[in-house]
């Protein structure tokens, strides 16, 4: 678990991810959180079903590089977004970060803060050399999160912008 002045970032176990997926408030009950109006986008549903859940279930992998880290806003004791890595570092020490903020919490700096804390965590992982990300070309808010955390634009293609930040 990672804590900032305003946020708690909590990595979810396999069982917690199943509860998260159900959208039935069972995860909120387990974590003693207030109920929220969260939903799961089609993209996140696909990532959960075909990437996150199978990778977290694989006990040969470090689940912290595959699971959702739910972001809890201390002020309201509610989940306000998620951040995750898309698997363990590759042979070059690269990992990819992804994130999403629930609608009512956007444009308040929470995701910039959360991504910054995740980058601090990656610096403590000896096998991480670089963090990659991509954003939709039109998603200015997401681009701002990356810029504010020191990412550099490395490419642009087919409606996406690709980013990186070196850790070592």
Image (cartoon, grey):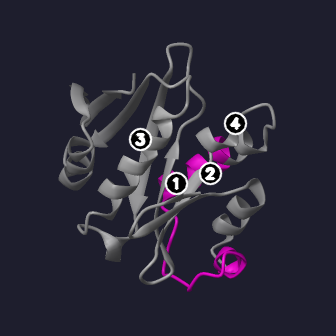
* Alpha carbons under labels 3 and 1: distance apart: 21 Å
* Alpha carbons under labels 2 and 3: distance apart: 22 Å
| 99 sits to left or right of 36 | left
User: Label 1 near label 3: C-beta < 8 Å?
Assistant: no
Q: Secondary structure at mark 4?
A: loop
Q: Which of the two discs, 2 and 4, sits closer to the camera? A: 4
Q: Where is the N terminus found, in terms of image quarters?
A: bottom right
* Alpha carbons under labels 2 and 4: distance apart: 16 Å
* Alpha carbons under labels 1 and 4: distance apart: 20 Å
Which residue is the site of mark 3? 119
Magenta segment includes 51: yes
Q: What label sits on residue 48 in the rendered view?
A: 2
User: Label 4 near label 2: C-beta < 8 Å?
Assistant: no
| 61 sits to left or right of 8 | right
Closer to the N terminus: mark 1 or mark 4? 1
Which residue is the site of mark 1? 44
- Span colored in magenta: 25-52
- Residue 122 higher or lower than 14, as above or below: above
Furthest residue toward top: 91
Closer to the N terminus: mark 2 or mark 4? 2
Which residue is the site of mark 4? 62
């Amino acid at each position: 678990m990672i804590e900032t002045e305003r946020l708690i970032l909590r990595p979810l176990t396999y069982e917690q991810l199943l509860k998260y997926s159900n959208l039935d408030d069972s995860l909120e009950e387990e974590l003693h959180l207030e109920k929220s109006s969260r939903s799961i986008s089609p993209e996140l549903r696909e990532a959960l079903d075909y990437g996150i859940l199978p990778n977290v279930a694989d006990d040969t992998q470090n689940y912290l590089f595959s699971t959702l880290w739910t972001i809890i806003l201390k002020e309201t004791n509610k989940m306000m977004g998620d951040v995750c890595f898309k698997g363990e570092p590759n042979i070059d020490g690269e990992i990819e970060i992804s994130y999403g903020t629930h609608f009512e919490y956007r444009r308040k700096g929470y995701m910039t803060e959360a991504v910054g804390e995740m980058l601090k965590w990656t610096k403590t992982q000896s096998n991480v050399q670089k963090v990659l990300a991509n954003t939709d070309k039109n998603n200015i808010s997401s681009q701002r999160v990356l810029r504010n955390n020191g990412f550099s634009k490395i490419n642009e293609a087919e409606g996406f912008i690709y980013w990186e930040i070196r850790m070592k």
